Amino acid sequence: MERKRLLDVRQLSHRYATGHEAIGELTFGVDDGELVSIVGPSGCGKTTLLKSIAGLQKNTGGTVSVDGEPVNDVPKGLAMVFQDYSRSLLPWLRVYANVELPLRYQALGTEERHRRVAQSLEAVGLDAAAHAYPWQLSGGMQQRVAIARALAYQPRLLLMDEPFASVDAQTRADLEDLVRRVRYQFNATILLVTHDIDEAVYLADRVLVLSGSPSRILAEIAVDLPQTRDQITTRADDVFVQLRSRVAQLIRRQPHTEGNLEPTPI
Amino acid sequence: MAVDIDRPPPLALAGRMVQSFAMRYSIGIGLIVAWQIATAHIHSIFFPTPVEILKHAIDLWLSGPAEHLFLSDAVFKDVLPSIGRLLTGWSLAVVFGTVLGVLMGRSRQLFDFADPILQFLRSLPGPALVPIFIILFGTETEMRIILIAFGTVWPVLLNTIDGVRAVDPVQIDTARSFRLPTSALIARTILPAAMPKIVAGAKISLSLAIILMVVSEFVASTNGIGYEILNAQMTLLLTDLWCGILLLALLGFCLNALFGFIEERLLYWHRGLHQRADR
Amino acid sequence: MDRSAIRSDYRRYSSRRRFAFGPVAKRCARGVAGVILFLLIAEFVTRLEIVPPIYLPRVSTVIARLDNLIFNPAFLWDIVATLYAWAIGLIFASVLGVAFGTLIGSSEIAYRMTSPVIEFLRPIPPVAVIPLGMILWGQGLSMKVILVAYATLWPILYNTIYGVHDVDPVALQTGRSFNLGSFAVWRRITLPSAAPFVFTGFRIAASMGLIVIVGTELLASAGSGIGSFILFASSNGGQMDTVLAAATIAGIIGVAVNGSLAAIEQRLFRWHYRHGD
């Protein structure tokens, strides 16, 4: 079955005003309904990549198109979940209002809005917390609110920037399963950036391994695991372990960079 | 029988309340008592005792008929018009300061253009402007309101610019990623995020407004709190003078308290957020 | 890893940060352009003579007057007199404010006991005390100094208390966990932590002090100072250009004071303002 190509990235590159080249040259695509994870060493420009795709930042080279339309500013039907949920959720609005906010500027009726908000809050398991303020909730719950907000928007493409990096390991496992679940429920196409190799393999249909900065794609690995996955059995599966070590080996060989410094040769 | 282990026995509770009351007010009460004793001892016309001041104040302002809430004419002639000018000027400053502040905070170019001039205008000492404003705008109420507005716009303006610039880029990115229209970006993301700083600026402006109100009434006026204070000084009615100071202190205190109340309601989320962060 | 590598990395990093603040020259140019534009518009408006030029002179006349004033020894003496009284009052207030502020801020009991009193006394406008001050202490230098000291005490005191009291408890605990003695904790954690707030209080006090002193001079008709000068010039009608010129100079002094203090603040406490801009 021919899947529509939703996201098309060609020769994307980005150089900061300081001269530092974050992204070397990236070419890849994401098909409708896929969950693709991008994994790479720290500082390799993963966030810059997502921001360029989202249209929040102008890239200095290459093109990005969503559903055939080139991206100049933020394209329609795109939602992003940020790593720092406490800074992304608006603290002066309650959970319900936070999830509802993006919907107010779409041409939806009040009823449809309410329905969507209720549906997504239920999908993430937070229907009881609708009247709380985000800062009254735990980290994991706050990230769920952010996910609910993205889902209620019913985006064509959902971008996630290291969404589980700021929560503890148990919560991370729960949230990973949540993402897999709602992906099917909402038929979402997801591009997820992470530094966690296990997570990248566990979640995705395809893993893109990035090099250190200036980043290029080292490998595109199809994840040959069943659709139903489980934290314990899948992670013990031979195929998983193999894929995981392959990715780990690729990444291990890369230099790590912090901030704006030039990478130091090892 | 269920015992409420969380509620302390009534005696201990009362003890705690007395203790907290003593904490808060003992120094204040102590100072007043010391002041009374000192001034009663000195017997100087320059320093009437607090009791005398209070009596005279009641005489001046609270000796009116019952249907006027016991407020005397002086209140209607001086106090209320003064407060009216004060609040009008201040409100103008807050509105204007916020609007201009948002514009300047958002646009780097506009800020670069306007900043040097605004820095200069704001450094002009308010009192020095009084003669100028009198010449430009006459000696009526409008002049005073404009003077107050001009003098008090700066804290609001500067704080708004500060607050707008300091809005978390993640919040702005979030709003942009959901394609919120610019009006929503400003009204629902930037303004609420900058609100703590804007409110802080408005609070400073309030104190400044009181100062300017008084100063504007020192020169070429026929009524107002400042006028009465100056009058008292020139006619050497010392107790009146002290009463005027007392009135201004009360005014400042009450306005600040009122504002604090509004601030609490507006910024409920901000306190909650930071209490959490401090844990 | 050898130290020289670390140091050179740091230098590269910090120089990159400075460059990342953008071409400063462009921003200065815009500022200058803005000022020139403002002056041109003002000149145009004043030439229209909506208000008779005796009341609102042309900008060019005022600028010419500026020249006159700057080389007028009497006026220069006035400026010195004003700044002198201002500085002394400010120093008094700083010493008292920081001393008492530190004491009160360090003790939880003292803090809680004095807060209500300070919150009550703080909003009393210093200008209200000017007439009283004039009666009690005449119209000379001592009255001006006392009033400036009184007015500027509050921001400094308040900010010092706040700065000392609100030192990050985690930082204090860290210090104690490394067995730092009380004095070391005070010197290396409390003081640097509170310093930005104290300095901000000082900066606010400095500006407020200027306002109070000019206001005082304006009301006390005798004596020297910029305020007296303006009062004198404006009561002799037809000297609006002088009045405006003097006010302009007062404003420039204010800008200079505030600007330099702000610049010092940014440099000294760069670590504190790292989140800004």
Image (cartoon, grey):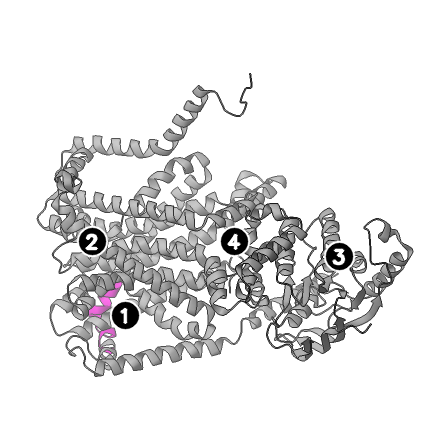
Label 1: element kind: helix
Q: CA distance from mark 2 to mark 3?
A: 66 Å
Q: CA distance from mark 2 to mark 4?
A: 38 Å
Local crowd at mark 4 within 10 Å, few (<14), some, or many (≥20)? some
Magenta-tinted stretch: C67-81
Q: Main secondary structure of the magenta part?
A: helix
Q: CA distance from mark 3 to mark 1?
A: 69 Å
Residue nearer the viewer, B196 or A63 = A63
Q: Which residue is mark 4?
A: A93
Residue A119 visible in the shown view: yes
Label 4: element kind: loop
**Residue at the limit of the structure toward the right, as seen here:** A238
Q: Residue at x 11, y 69 (%)?
A: C236
Query: In the drawing, does residue A14 fall left or right of residue C101?
Result: right
- Compared with B248, B44 (above or below) is above
Quadrant of the image occupied by residue A120: bottom right
Residue A266 visible in the shown view: no
Numbered disc 3: what chain? A
Query: In the drawing, does residue B98 fall left or right of residue C137?
Result: right
Give the residue type at disc 2. Answer: Ser
Q: CA distance from mark 2 to mark 1?
A: 31 Å
Tell me whether marks 3 and 1 sit on the same chain.
no
Q: Which residue is mark 2?
A: B82
Q: Comparing marks 3 and 1, which lies closer to the viewer?
A: 3
